[in-house]
Image (tube, grey):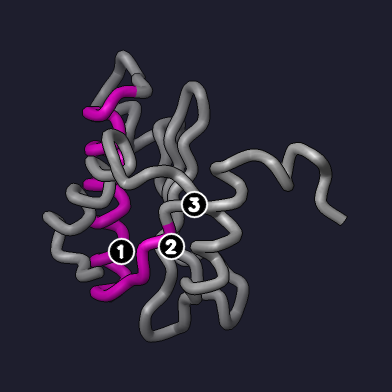
Amino acid sequence: MLTKRERKDPRLIRKRRVRRKVLGSSGQPRLTVYKGNHHIYAQIIDDERGHTLVAASSLSPEFRERMPQGGKSVEAARVVGEILGGKALALGIQKVVFDRGGFLYHGKIKALADAVRQQGIVF
């Protein structure tokens, strides 16, 4: 049963609506994004097996090397997207389905998606 917050929160409503339509497979896994108050997280998931194939966040060591000051900015989201795209290409992932997780496609989410696309991932 859904809690009162889960029924009323607009982001969670959008998240449920997006997840009904987006499903990743082995051939085309799902790229999902979560944006917290302090960090941004992205991962590529194979929904058929239920495994995370690649993950990157503003907490990862690769991110800390490129942005030692940390950050929760649009620039930080772009760097996370570049890291994720590079890792995905190294594993041979070329096509994904984008799951924005109920967040509006704007600002940090858009910057991350554009950075992943610039690395050569198609969605």
Element marked by disc 1: helix
Alpha carbon of mark 1 to alpha carbon of mark 3: how far? 19 Å
Q: Nearer the viewer, mark 3 or mark 2?
A: 3
In the rendered image, the quadrant that contains the N terminus is bottom right
Please determine whether, in this image, residue 55 is positioned above or below residue 77.
below
Alpha carbon of mark 3 to alpha carbon of mark 2: how far? 13 Å
Q: How packed is label 2: few (under 14 Cα within 10 Å), some, or many (20 or more)?
A: many
In this view of the protein, which residue sits in the foreground, 100 or 48?
Answer: 100
- Magenta-drawn segment: 73-99
- State yes or no: residue 74 in magenta: yes
The image position of residue 36, as x and y in percent, is 51, 31
The image position of residue 122, as x and y in percent, is 20, 70
Of callouts 1 and 3, which one flags the residue occurring earlier in the amino acid sequence? 1
Please determine whether, in this image, residue 102 is positioned above or below residue 24.
above
Q: Nearer the viewer, mark 1 or mark 3?
A: 3
- Inspect the image, locate mark 3, and give the three-letter code of the amino acid beneath it: Gly
At 45% from the left and 56% from the top, the residue drawn is 32
Of callouts 1 and 2, which one flags the residue occurring earlier in the amino acid sequence? 2
Q: Do tag 1 and tag 3 residues touch (Cβ < 8 Å)?
A: no
The residue beneath circle 3 is 101
At 21% from the left and 66% from the top, the residue drawn is 121
The image position of residue 53, as x and y in percent, is 46, 66
At 30% from the left and 63% from the top, the residue drawn is 88
The image position of residue 109, as x and y in percent, is 33, 42
Q: Residue furthest front?
A: 8
The residue beneath circle 2 is 44
The residue beneath circle 1 is 88
